Every structure is written in C-alpha cells, then in structure tokens.
Image (cartoon, helix red, strand yellow):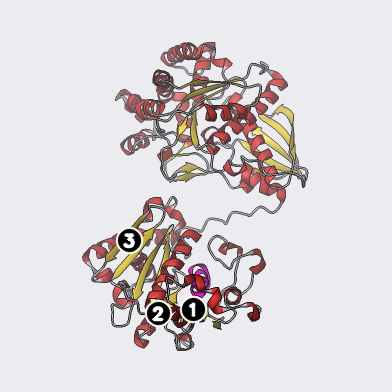
Amino acid sequence: MPDAGAFNYQLAFDRNLGLLTDWEQQALRGKKIAIAGMGGVGGFHLLTLARLGIGNFHIADFDRFGVENFNRQVGATIETLGRPKVDVMAEMALSINPELGITRFPAGIDGDNLDAFLHGVDLFVDGLDFFVLDIRRRMFARCAELGIPAITAAPLGMGAGFLAFLPGGMSFEEYFRFEGRGETQQYVRFLMGLSPRGLHRPYVVDPSRIDLRNRRGPSTVAGVELCAGVAGVAAVKLLLGRGGIRAAPYHHHFDAYRGKLVVTRLGWGNAGPVQRLKLAIGDRIYGAMARQAASTPAPPTPRRPASRLEEILNIARWAPSGDNVQSWRFRILGEDTIEIRLKDSSDENVYEYREAEPSLLAGGMLLECLRIAATAFGSGMSWRYEGHSDRDYRITARFPVDLSAKADPLYSYLTLRSTNRYPYRLKALGPQAKAALTEALGQELRIDWWESATDRWRWAGLSAAATDIRLRMREAFSVHQRMIDWDRSFSPTGIPAKAVGLNLPSRMAMRWAMKSWERMRFLNRLGGTASAALQLDYLPGVFSAGYFAIRDPSVPQNGTDRAERLLQCGGRILRFWLSATRLGLTMQPALAILGLAHYGATGRMFTSDPALRSKAANLAGRLRAVTGSEPDGLLFVGRIGYRQPQITKVRSVRLPFEELIETGAPV
C-alpha cells in the first residue's frame, strides 16, 4: 500500500485548477464512478479519472494480464504477467491517490452482483471488451432504470468513438437494436452503431484480422488513450453538471490518423433507413466471413521461436528473393550453427543467368539479413561457402554469443523493406541521399545514376521491351502463373496480383489470360503487352527519381571465387536497399532487363521463338547504348524514388520460419 503520509490532495491536483474551480475539484473528490473492465480502455479510464481527482471507484474484471495485452493495456508489463487486472489497476490508481475509495469486483459482473456494482455510483463508464455484449446490454439497461448516466468510448483504429446514454434519453437498446438478432448480427450492429461513418476503415490494411468468429480485432494504444481522454472530459462535465453533452442519438468519432471529427445524429439509431442499408450489407459481409470461418479448419497457429537461433531466422526470412520464391532452407546443426541450402534454379527459371547470379545475389542478401538480425539478439555472425552440389549452393553460418553486440541501425527496416511497382513521387534524390546510398555499397561496388526525364524515359523503354518479351515467351508463362497470387493480398509464396502494378480491368483480363497459353497469346494479339508496358514500365519509370545500375569490377568469371564474391555483393546490395528504406525511399529491381539482355548479347538459347531472340538482341544493344557497358558488366539495376503517401494493403510476405527449417542430417 502506498504511503498516504506523503500525499496531499490539494497539492496533487492543483494543476487542474483554472480549468476546474476549487469547489468543483472538491466535488469530484466525493464522486464515485463504476468502471467495468480493467483491460484496454478500462485501465486507462481508471488512471485518467484518478488524475482528474475522482475520489471513489467500483472496478470489475475477472481476467489476468498476459503478453497479448502489451500493445494497448496500461497495466500489462513484465512485472504484472499473470496477475489479476483489478488488483494491478487498483494498485496503480492508489499510487496516484492513496486516499481513493476502491471497491474491487474480481469475478467480473453478472446478474448476481450487478446492483452491488452500481450501488451509489454517479456515473458508469464502459470498459468492457467489444465482444462482451450480454452483460453490457444488462448494465446499460440497469443504469437507465436507476437513473445513472452511462458512457462508452470505443477505440476505433487510431481514434475514438463516443456515446452517452443519459436518464430519460434514448436507451442503449433503442440505439443499437440488438433484440432478436443472432450473435454475429449483434456484433455488426454494435460496430455500425459505434462507427456510423467508419472514419478508420480506409487505413485498415488487413481486414482478415477482424475475426468475429474468434472474437478478435485490431486495437492500438493510440485509440485507447484517446478514449480515456474523451471519456474523462465527458465524466467531468456530467459529474459537475456543466452540460453540453450531446447524448444518443448523437455519436462522436474523432480519428487522429485522418485528423477528422464527425458528429452523427442517428434519430432512429440503427433503425434508420440509411443505417439499415449499411447493416444489411454488413450482415452479408460478416455473415459470409463467419460461415466461411466455421466451415474452414482454423489454420495452425505459427510456432513461436524457441531459441535465440530461431529468433534470428524468424527475422532474417524477410530477405528479398525474385518472385518471392524464398529459395533457401535451413538445417540447424547446433545451438549456434546452421547449414543454408540455396537452391540453384538456373536450369528451371528463364530469368536466371550467368551461373545463377540472381540466386547467389539473393543468397547474399539473406546472409546479410541473418547478420543484421543476429546483432539484435546479442550474437555475432560468420559464414563459409561450402560449394555447389546436387543443384544446391551450401553455406554454413555460425552465430556465437556476443555480449558487446549492438543492434545494427538497419535492423528495424528488415521487415519494412519491400518492392514497390507503382509510380513514385517526382522528387529528386538529392546529393545527401545519394551519398548515403553509395556509402552503403562499400568501397568496391560502383553505382551509376540516370535521373533526367530523358534518361527515365529511355530506361522505361528498356523495361517495356523486357515486359513485351516476357509476356510473349511461352517458356516464361508457367513462371508467371506460379508467381502471381490472385487470391491473397498478403502472399507468403508469390506476388499478390494487386501488387503487380496493373489496374483492375487489366488484372481481370490478365487473370482470364493466365488460365492457358492459348488465352495469353490471344490477349497479346489484341495488344495486351502495350497496355501492360504502359502500366508496368512507362508510367512507373517516368514517375520516379531515376534509375541506377550497380557494378562490381572485381567479380571473377566462374568457379568458387565467383560464387563467394556474388554472395558478398548481395549483402552490400541488401544494405543499399535497407538504407534506401531508412531514407524514406522505395525501389523496384529491374533484373529482367539484365537477364534478357544477357541472352540477347550472348546468343544463348532461352526461347524457341526466333522473333523474341531478335528482340532480346535489340534490348542488349539498347542497354549497351544507355549504360556504356555490356549487360554482363552490370550486377543489379533498378528504379528508385520517394513513394506516394499510401497505405500498404497488399505485399509479399514470407513463409513461417518453421517451414524453412529442414530436419535430418546434412547431406
């Protein structure tokens, strides 16, 4: 119990005065508030109201704190894991004001103790979980019967929705209209009533996280804290009789993310004609989601990393790879040692060239991801190239404990880095950004920039020529079928169709064409490659800061030395990419240009179509004219710039780390 002798009420809350009068502050000292729920909003409500000088509380919650509460619940800490929420929050409130009168209801609220919970209170503040509707309905109904004002503030995205139900006004049931509805329909009515305008919906990046079946939904501490502020102000006005509270059917929604406040009047609550239309749509959408979830076995819960080594692998798996193929697998050899098997796909993939150069560069990026991740878990990292056999490149990596290790500054960007295939802002990089990117490549790699409008147009033309070849090449068709994920916005094994760079009509046409090569040829004859090139190459190319090409004068021509060198170069390119992300830049590799130009320059048989081989030779000549070097003299090329301000609602993700770990003895 805190030492009450060190506390002085007048001094503790003196800074409230000026916004409150002396007698108003003393009036708050004698008030009593009931708060149901001590988790997300409830815990913040209690502490906010305690700091406003409220003197008495009834608090209820049957739950205990867990790690899953850390993102939004003020009482959730390492020290409070497993402890009852009512006890932790009571202690925190008493540490603010040791004179508080707090009555705890550690078993939660039910029909037997509802009246005791509301006995003598001046205000009820709703802090119950969204999905707890039965007792919430009974609580608000009983408050109406007893003449107790009742308020609810709901965290909606990164904002707060607020409703007040006052004696003699519209009731909770009249507003939400739950009676006679099934569970899912009640959830929809509660959600629509809490958020009639849905200000937060445009930035919900992953709707699949709204899981009514398992009673889960996204919530942030930003929204929760805003709720506490809104409810605290309303409590002061109600308890002091200052007026100005617009109760139901008025609804308030402030969204800090969008900087908007709307006040909506639903004169008939959820029974209004517009609201009924919204509810009908919501019932269909969420009802279908619930039925699908009920008929679909729940996916296995991803296994949490169980060791320092697994923690490192779990982060490093975000390394980039062409078409998101993730061509690496791990075998754990000991507590600090792994074997990496890097698949050689040079004979399977038409975009592999020059002794599987893209695969080796991607492997080098993986190694650098492993090294960066290791620094965040107190480990060093070293690797040794073991050679090429059985169509695999094999590497051994060790992660010894290093107590002096500090997290690499680029660590936070490992999971944020991504490929952006859409147009960027027309903003130049500037000398400081280019200097930082050049430094990231190290002393040995060289970089050239093409930034003028003319240069961007020429590079866009090279990219369009590569697109034309790719879409007309029978040998590439199966690769495209495999890599485009038409069904998922977050694809663990490919590229989501919405992230490819095509608009909706073009995606629909492409999906139809991807069913068979005959359809694809038909689309090409209709000029399909021209439309694709405009969207995938010319518009993105022109709307960017520019293009770049990275070269390494010291790469050996073949053998073990070449493989090791390419792995090292891949690591430097990964640091370049992460540094770009750190600077607020985004980029798109353009390796198809290099691969197809290589075939055109060397005459290597990559397709049976002589017309496409001729186009590849032409592409090689055009690339030579732009860069002043042979295609094989370039290591990595791409487009870079500042991204448009938009929310990432689609992207390639990765397989769970445990699916990348193989068992058994090393070969």
Q: Which residue is disc 1 drawn over?
A: 54
Magenta-tinted stretch: 34-57
Q: Say whether residue 54 is magenta.
A: yes
> Which one is earlier in the sequence, the residue at label 3 or at label 1?
1
Find residue 239 and name its label. 2
Q: Residues within 10 Å of mark 3 (few under 14, many from 20)?
A: some
Circle 1: element type: loop
Specify few, some or many for label 2: CA neighbours under 10 Å numbering under 14, 14-19, or 20 or more. Answer: some
Q: Is residue 220 visible?
A: no
Judging depth in this view, the residue of 210 and 508 nearest the camera is 210
Residue on which the image places disc 3? 282
Q: Residue shown at 60%/32% (left/top)?
A: 574
Q: Residues within 10 Å of mark 1 (few under 14, many from 20)?
A: many
Dots 1 and 2: beta carbons under 8 Å?
Answer: yes
Distance between the alpha carbons at the discs numbered 2 and 3:
37 Å
Between 64 and 488, the one lying in front of the other is 64
The image quarter containing residue 410 is top right
Q: Callout 1, which amino acid?
A: Ile
Q: Nearer the viewer, residue 8 or 190?
A: 8
User: As drawn, is 93 to the left or to the right of 180?
Assistant: right
The Cα–Cα distance between marks 3 and 1, rounded to whole angstroms, is 40 Å
Residue at 44% across, 51% down:
206
Left or right: 560 with respect to 658? right
Quarter of the image with the N terminus in it: bottom right
Looking at numbered disc 2 in the image, what kind of residue is underneath it? Leu
Q: Earlier in the sequence, mark 2 or mark 3?
A: 2
Vertical side of 377 occupied by 425: above or below: above
Position of residue 432 in the picture relative to residue 289 (left or right):
right
Look at the numbered disc 2 and give the secondary structure of its residue. Answer: helix
